[in-house]
DNA sequence: GCCAACGTTGGC
DNA sequence: GCCAACGTTGGC
């Protein structure tokens, strides 16, 4: 199982929307590196759900459908996956908190701020869940 | 709102 | 194939 972080603009698709909907298509990715990451996702992979601008991780979602053609992409080059809500963080984890932890300096979140779908290693995943005061259900 | 860091586009 | 001009993302 792989671990990821996905970004969304809350005015476009928010954690509140995600909670309400339960399962939603993750579409609109128009960056090749991000698309490559989407294609690498397998069912059961978990992702941090990150609000850009608010700059915080709200909770965890899970890949429930592997990549398929993004219906919103006319060029046919980009893909979407389906994400299911897993659970909210008890405490949201802000970008500031992540930046203060030296063990997380290597994260793409800090180094490649524009990448909207990015891998997270297990160790960083555990640290961030701990910061979120949350044990993620299996 | 500004702008740095990318990506993309199109003229050459 | 290079690169200037332009567009977009997202932190500040």
Image (cartoon, coloured by chain):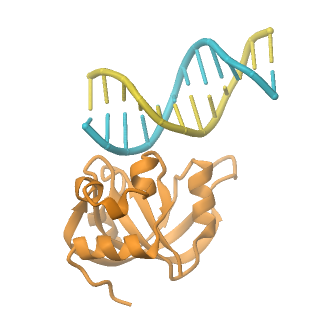
Chain colours: A orange, B yellow, C cyan
Residue A74 is at least partly visible in this image: yes
Relative to the observer, which residue lies in front, A92 or A65? A92
Residue furthest out toward the bottom: A138
Could you tell whether A67 is left or right of A126 in the image?
Answer: right
Q: Nearer the viewer, residue A29 or A37?
A: A37
Q: Is residue A91 left or right of residue B5?
A: left
What is the x, y in percent for residue B12?
80, 9
Q: Whole-percent x and y of residue A26?
A: 49, 63
Q: Nearer the viewer, residue A107 or B6?
A: A107
Locate residue A133, reporting x and y percent.
Answer: 20, 77
Q: Nearer the viewer, residue A56 or C12?
A: C12
From this viewpoint, is residue A70 visible? no
Residue A105 left/right relative to C4: left
Q: Residue farthest to the front?
A: A102
Q: How many marks?
A: 0
Residue A42, horizontal then vertical, whole percent: 58, 77
Answer with the quarter of the image where residue B8 lies. top right
- Give the residue drawn at x 23%, y 72%: A132
Kindly identify the residue that appears in the image at 62 percent across and 50 percent down.
Answer: A32
Residue drawn 23% across the image and 53% down it: A96
Q: Is residue A71 left or right of residue B1?
A: right
State whether residue A90 is above or below residue A49: below
**Residue A134: quadrant of the picture:** bottom left
Q: Which quadrant is the C terminus of chain A positioned in?
A: bottom left
């Amino acid at each position: 199982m792989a671990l990821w972080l996905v970004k969304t603009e809350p005015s476009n698709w928010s954690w509140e929307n995600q909670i309400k909907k339960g399962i939603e298509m993750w579409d609109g990715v128009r960056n090749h590196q991000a698309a490559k990451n989407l294609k690498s996702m397998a069912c059961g992979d978990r992702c941090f759900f990150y609000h850009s601008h608010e700059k915080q991780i709200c909770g965890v979602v899970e890949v429930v459908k592997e990549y398929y053609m993004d219906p919103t992409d006319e060029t046919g080059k980009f893909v979407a996956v389906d994400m299911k809500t897993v659970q909210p963080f008890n405490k949201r984890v802000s970008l500031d908190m992540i930046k203060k932890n030296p063990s997380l300096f290597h994260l793409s979140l800090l180094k490649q701020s524009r990448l909207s779908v990015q891998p997270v290693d297990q160790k960083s995943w555990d640290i961030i869940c701990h910061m979120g005061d949350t044990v993620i259900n299996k």
